[in-house]
Amino acid sequence: MAANKTMESPDNIDSTAGSGLVSTDLFSPYFSDSSVTIYHGDSRHIVPTLGGFDLLLTDPPYGIGDKWTTGEIVAKTGSSRLWGKGETWDDQPAPWWLMLAMMERCEKSIVWGGNYYPMPPSRCWLSWDKVQEFTGSDSEHAWTNMDKAARTFRMSRGAAHAQMKKVHPTEKPLKLIQWCIEQAGDVATILDPFAGSGTTGEAAKVLGKRAVLIEREEKYCEAAAKRLSQEMLIF
Ligand SMILES: C[S@@+](CC[C@H](N)C(=O)[O-])C[C@H]1O[C@@H](n2cnc3c(N)ncnc32)[C@H](O)[C@@H]1O
């Protein structure tokens, strides 16, 4: 899906002050349509060139990559796939300066795995209760800067997987990410600098929002572009 790789994206440059989605014009998008733009590259280089967004909704690496590559996850879950063998995408957490750079560009922030980072105190954590039937964590947690009550979304991994063909080892359920956008209230533009398979892009599209995604691994850019290119999004 590298066809759009060199495409310029004038539609993505909207310098309207305030809530405008201001994308970089220093990098060429890997994929772009009227609602989602994907950059294939390193967020450490791309985020500093971006303007402002209404919502940061992201799921950065947690720095627990060895658990994926040594087979610990396979042993615990009985999964038939050794996800991430030979991959390095989850070896290190994102640098703190990058987390700050992402957050300062966005009015609201929702950061999955915030419990792996030194986030400031927050009234509102969003949780995903996986209604576990087996070992592994019962829930995952997203830090937010929203001043509202904490909330929990309940969906088993089984139910989530029935709705999607998973292409990324830590792919989040589409319904969960849609729910996150709804929790943020009135937002039009979304940034996800650790996009993986593009779940945030698909959720944004389904809800009629605009999103900019960044992903370092080309195979996940390709998967994201493919799912966003489907004429009929299933939701
Ligand atoms: C936890 S996964 C995100 C999964 C995503 N929520 C989904 O539903 O598919 C984090 C992603 O961040 C990417 N990544 C890690 N460091 C990056 C960086 N510096 N710039 C861009 N992407 C990065 C990894 O390749 C990985 O795909």
Image (tube, grey):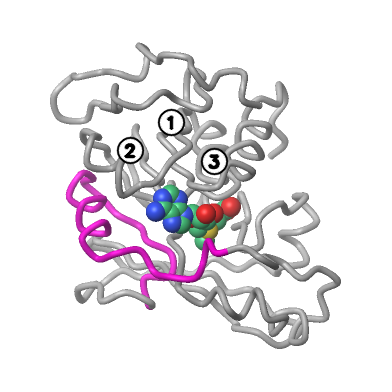
The amino acid pointed to by label 2 is: Val
Looking at the rendered structure, the secondary structure element under dot 3 is helix
Q: Give the percent coordinates (x, y) of residue 198.
A: 56, 43
| Quadrant in the picture for residue 138 | bottom right
Q: Which residues are magenta?
A: 88-115
Which one is nearer the viewer's eye here, 34 or 150? 34
Q: Is mark 2 within 8 Å of ligand 1?
A: no
Please identify the residue farthest to the front as the structure is shown.
86
What's the mark number on residue 203? 3
Residue bearing the label numbered 2: 187
Circles 1, 2 touching at the beta carbon (< 8 Å): yes
Looking at the rendered structure, the secondary structure element under dot 2 is loop
| Quadrant in the picture for residue 2 | top right
**Closer to the N terminus: mark 1 or mark 2?**
2
Q: Give the percent coordinates (x, y) of residue 147.
A: 22, 62
Q: Give the percent coordinates (x, y) of residue 233.
A: 69, 31
Crowding near the residue tagged with mark 1, few <14, some 14–19, many ≥20 C-alpha atoms within 10 Å: some
